[in-house]
Image (cartoon, helix red, strand yellow):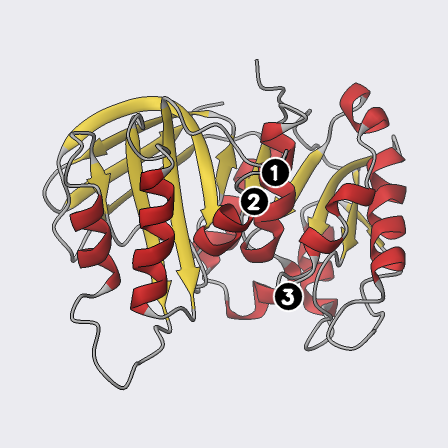
Amino acid sequence: MIKQPPYLKKGDKVAIVSPAKKLKQPIGDAIALLEGWGLEVVIGKSVYAEHHQFAGNDALRAEDLQCYLDDKEIKAIIAARGGYGTIRIIDALSFSVFNVYPKWVVGFSDITVLLSHLIAMEQTQSIHGQMPGTFHDATPESIESLRKALFGEDLSYSYESEYPNRPGEAEGILIGGNLSLLVALEGSSSAMDFKDKILFLEDVGEYEYAIDRMLRMLKRGGKLAELKGLIIGAFNHIELEDIPFGQGAEEVIAEIVSDYSYPVCFNFPVGHIEDNRAMVLGKNTILKVEHHLVSFRQQH
């Protein structure tokens, strides 16, 4: 059974930390927005720290995250940004107190490492959603979806996919995140169990051949064969090669999962985009896919 941390209420304390890269700019506006939701915001010492490209060295980032994992007054931990670096500290963390007093952990991109670990090792739900470092470009809908996820309101999305979907209906536990990071976690204790799950994937700045290679690795490992459904988010800022690969990301993915019969939807509003809607990992999800119309629901 995957544990659900207590939903937030006004007056709760939340902490912002930076487990990976250093911030590009201050996040005062994001802090004010969270305070506008009635939350008391605590700023970790990693948030404005710097060590090369990281938000402080590995020891500082691990210590900062550990502090708030152990602090019973903190009801949610929100990553300031992604980038790279969480995989460098994940094995230095203890979740013994967190297991007794679970709390929401929020982020996406490189924070997939932490979210996946929470599912795989701690059997605890988490939130894939916008981070303070991305609030300035985020759509109002994506910010509101994060608030709803944190405060325990239903999440319901409907949209029309530009790329043709594979129709069907699915219900199951949602897992997923950034494709590159999920592949990097394979073979470790932080890797999630894909069987009978609804999987979502997104990535940014990859070559088409690299997307093909990573998906084929997952397929060869049996990870894609027994899914209940597949949600494909944004695969944007694709790197160009001297000799064209000949298939876009959606074409690559559609071909690789063509052996299976579960529903597959494309262009879902999740990933390194302005309209990055919040999703609760580890939560039961209802997915309905038509050729171009998609609906997604997570109920309280």
SS at badge 1? loop
Q: Which residue is mark 3?
A: 133
Quick one: label 1, few (<14), some, or many (20+) residues within 10 Å?
A: few
Assess whether mark 3 and mark 2 are in contact (beta carbons under 8 angstroms): no
The image quarter containing residue 71 is top right
Which amino acid, by three-letter code, is at mark 1?
Ser
SS at badge 2? helix
Residue 158 lies, in percent from the top left, at 27, 42
Q: Which residue is mark 2?
A: 185
User: Which residue is pictured at 69% across the width and 33% down the height?
Assistant: 8
Residue 157 can be seen, yes or no: no
In space, the residues marked 1 and 2 are separated at their CA atoms by 6 Å
Give the camera-side residue of 279 and 60. Answer: 60
Which amino acid, by three-letter code, is at mark 2?
Leu
Quick one: label 2, few (<14), some, or many (20+) residues within 10 Å?
A: some
SS at badge 3? helix
Residue 274 lies, in percent from the top left, at 44, 64
Q: Which residue is mark 1?
A: 188
- In the image, residue 254 above or below residue 225: below
Q: Quadrant of the N terminus?
A: top right
In space, the residues marked 2 and 3 are separated at their CA atoms by 24 Å
Say left or right for 68 vs 195: right
- In the image, residue 78 above or below residue 115: below
